[in-house]
Amino acid sequence: MDTLTISQLKQTASDAPIYADVDLQLQSRTIKTTKTNKPYLEIAFADSTGAFTLKLWEDRPLFTAARDWPDGVMLRVSGKWTQNQYGLDGNDLSARVLNREERELFLTGDPEIQAKQHADWETITTLCSSITDPRLADLCQAFFQRFGEHFRRTAAARKNHHARRGGLVEHVAQMMRSADALCSVYQNWNRDLLLAGVLFHDCGKLWENSYPKDGFTQIHSLRGEMLGHIPIGIEAVNHLWRERLEAEENTHWLTLEPASEDVRLHLLHLIASHHGQYEFGSPTLPRTPEAFALHYIDNLDAKEEMLHHAYLQGAEIAPRIYEKVFPLPANLVAPLTHFQPCPPPAGNVTEDHAEPSNE
């Protein structure tokens, strides 16, 4: 059998079973019961490319062994895999613990994702180095120095979009590209503020959706559970700003225009309002052009990631129509392909370019 990553398995599996080995790390395991009081296990697995949840019923051979798996164990799970709109399912499954060599290879992660995240990190640092406001530029560099390594192993979410180690780097880099491009169209926007807002909008996820240095199991922290990433992000940026303001080399901040206090408030507003609505967790609503821009750029990139995976995972229920994949609201239709101009037939000469007559 082939050994696949989670991403490859999601792209390959369908209603028809495929036989495959998948190297996985146990994220969580919960014993639940059906309406008829039959127990089953809900198990979350992860690797460098993503995560998925598997239900193991009491009558499955793997059920008993899975109850005793230690937290964070790395396994090779083998069997027949299928996929529908609710996700992956496995039958005739067996599992064994990875040996030391397999574990080391597993922890290196998928090389394509590593290369992409390295390029995305370069995008983030390059665009932040172009910020001209010395206060925002200094704040970004201080953040990289203190939290850069932590940032690079954080996910953008627990599920739905960029829900993998380093996913926040991918999400922020693409948002920065969009923000930078749109600032050339909407020239009244404050580019420095918007780029800094993109960097910091989800920085609270460093305490909500991060990973250990050695593994692909997202960490659950009391701080993340009780506060959520928006209040944590406001607190983190506010603390870092106060530190930089009090640094001896930054005493000139108090003489700059716009006033440093205004810059701080506008940046914190971007973090506070980026979910766009109270019911989605924002403590306030967008009230500036940059706040609206950040909200829509964030939402667009999250939806684009969901669409990408939905086309790969969704079953084609009719020609060019794909079944609904959660959390998208409806069935998808295949996107329109790009126009391909037809080359003129060989040897065909139009009237405008015909040879002149001798008559």
Image (spheres, helix red, strand yellow):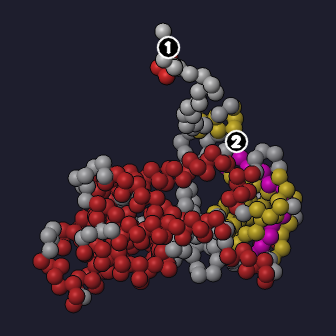
In this picture, residue 100 sits left or right of residue 279: right
Q: Amino acid at mark 1?
A: Ser
Residue 168, given in percent of the width and then of the height, sits at 50, 66
Q: Does 288 appear above or below 206?
A: above
Tell me the element at label 2: loop
**Residue at image location 83% in from the left, 52% down from the top:** 18
Q: Nearer the viewer, residue 51 or 147?
A: 147
Q: Give the number of the disc on residue 357.
A: 1
Residue 209 showing in the rendered view: no
Q: Nearer the viewer, residue 178 or 23?
A: 178
Q: Does 91 appear above or below 260?
A: above
**Residue at image location 32% in from the left, 80% down from the top:** 240
Q: Which residues are magenta?
A: 74-86
- In the rendered picture of this protein, how many numbered marks are placed on residues? 2
Magenta stretch holds residue 15 = no
**Residue at image location 48% in from the left, 74% down from the top:** 151
Mark 1 / mark 2, whichever is N-terminal:
2
**Residue at image location 58% in from the left, 80% down from the top:** 212
Q: Nearer the viewer, residue 204 or 115?
A: 115
The CA distance from mark 1 to mark 2 is 61 Å
